[in-house]
Image (cartoon, helix red, strand yellow):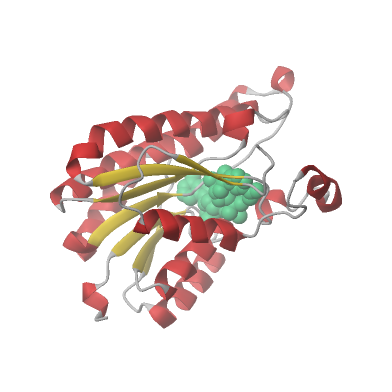
């Protein structure tokens, strides 16, 4: 397919981990990609050059998703560059700042909510205007099984991820008549930098499928939801059965 005819998917947190794998799977499947990252220039540069092997018009943007002005300006740039090609948004950027609830600082509570939940809202608000103009599209939000079943030590994170589910369902209802579907993916334990300090052997004992997930397990779910026409407002668990 001609590069300019490819649909564009905006991926937040595309520099590393699940986002990186998603970016690379998307360009393999014939999409082009604009991905956001917040600080890791080197990882972003590497991911971009890998993505450009398949899709030379792909780009990356440094943008803190928790900062609404930064998001607005970045999305304006993306629209100027890709206009009617903008087709989908994957809200993947996320952080953890774990600690027991009784000892959790205001700063750790706020930062996780700001990046994970407010960041998803900021991006959805700006990109949805473009999708409405373009008469349809897809929004896929990366939640977590922590947002469904909770997780000790993650009051901030689990609340942000549960909030994303509420946001997903509300946006699905608001955009249902506009050709835009909105779904969430709830990953279980996935091997990335976010989980590198966990004891893999102990974690795997808890998982019915007896292995941690790979970033590619989530990327496959993103591709599936991009191709699905009659699914909206759903939460797809990709967790090896941990939240059965
Ligand atoms: P990583 O820590 O490997 O990567 C996080 C990504 O988010 C990076 O690209 C990072 O950019 C970006 N990011 C962080 N803060 C911001 C910000 N303020 N603005 C823009 N981008 C930002 O995480 P994972 O790949 O493991 O996780 C991806 C998503 O999946 C997250 O939402 C996470 O909560 C969710 N998830 C992960 C699970 C797991 O087990 N790994 C389980 C369940 C859900 P930069 O490189 O610039 O820092």
Going 37% across and 56% down the picture, which residue do you hit? Answer: 226
The answer to whether residue 122 is above or below residue 52 is above
**Circle count:** 0
Q: Position of residue 92 (x, y in %)?
A: 48, 49
The answer to whether residue 5 is above or below residue 121 is below
- For this rendering, which residue is in front, 8 or 75? 8
- For this rendering, which residue is in front, 20 or 74? 20
- Can the viewer see residue 157 in this picture? no
Going 75% across and 55% down the picture, which residue do you hit? Answer: 211
Q: Position of residue 69 (x, y in %)?
A: 31, 41
Q: Position of residue 42 (x, y in %)?
A: 55, 68
Residue 7 sits in which quadrant?
bottom left
Quadrant (top left/top right/bottom left/bottom right) for the C terminus = top right
Taking 217 as reference, is 36 left or right?
A: left
- For this rendering, which residue is in front, 115 or 147? 147
Going 40% across and 72% down the picture, which residue do you hit? Answer: 29
Going 48% across and 59% down the picture, which residue do you hit? Answer: 14
Q: Position of residue 145 (x, y in %)?
A: 61, 38
Taking 175 as reference, is 231 left or right?
A: right
Residue 2 sits in which quadrant?
bottom left
The answer to whether residue 30 is above or below residue 104 is below
Residue 80 sits in which quadrant?
bottom left
Quadrant (top left/top right/bottom left/bottom right) for the N terminus = bottom left
- Can the viewer see residue 241 in this picture? yes
């Amino acid at each position: 397919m001609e590069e300019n005819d490819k649909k564009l998917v905006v991926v937040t947190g595309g520099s590393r981990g699940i986002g990186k794998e998603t970016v690379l799977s998307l360009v393999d499947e014939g999409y082009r990609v604009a991905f956001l990252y917040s600080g890791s220039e080197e990882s972003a540069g590497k991911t971009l050059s890998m993505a450009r092997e398949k899709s030379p018009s792909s780009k990356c943007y440094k943008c803190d998703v928790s900062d609404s002005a930064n998001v607005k300006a970045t999305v304006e740039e993306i629209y100027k560059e890709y206009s009617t090609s903008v087709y989908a948004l994957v809200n993947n950027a996320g952080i953890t700042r774990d600690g027991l609830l009784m000892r959790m600082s205001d700063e750790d509570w706020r930062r996780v909510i700001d990046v994970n939940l407010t960041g998803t809202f900021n991006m959805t608000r700006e990109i949805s205007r473009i999708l409405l103009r373009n008469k349809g599209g897809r929004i896929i939000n990366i939640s977590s099984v922590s947002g469904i079943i909770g997780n000790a030590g993650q009051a901030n994170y689990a609340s942000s991820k549960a909030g994303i589910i509420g946001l997903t369902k509300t946006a699905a209802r608001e955009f249902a008549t506009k050709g835009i579907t909105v779904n969430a993916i709830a990953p279980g334990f996935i091997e990335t930098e976010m989980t590198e300090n966990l004891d893999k052997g102990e974690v795997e004992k808890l998982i019915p499928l007896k292995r941690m997930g790979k970033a590619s397990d989530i990327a496959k779910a993103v591709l599936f939801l991009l191709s699905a026409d009659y699914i909206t407002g759903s939460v797809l668990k990709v967790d090896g059965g941990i939240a059965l």
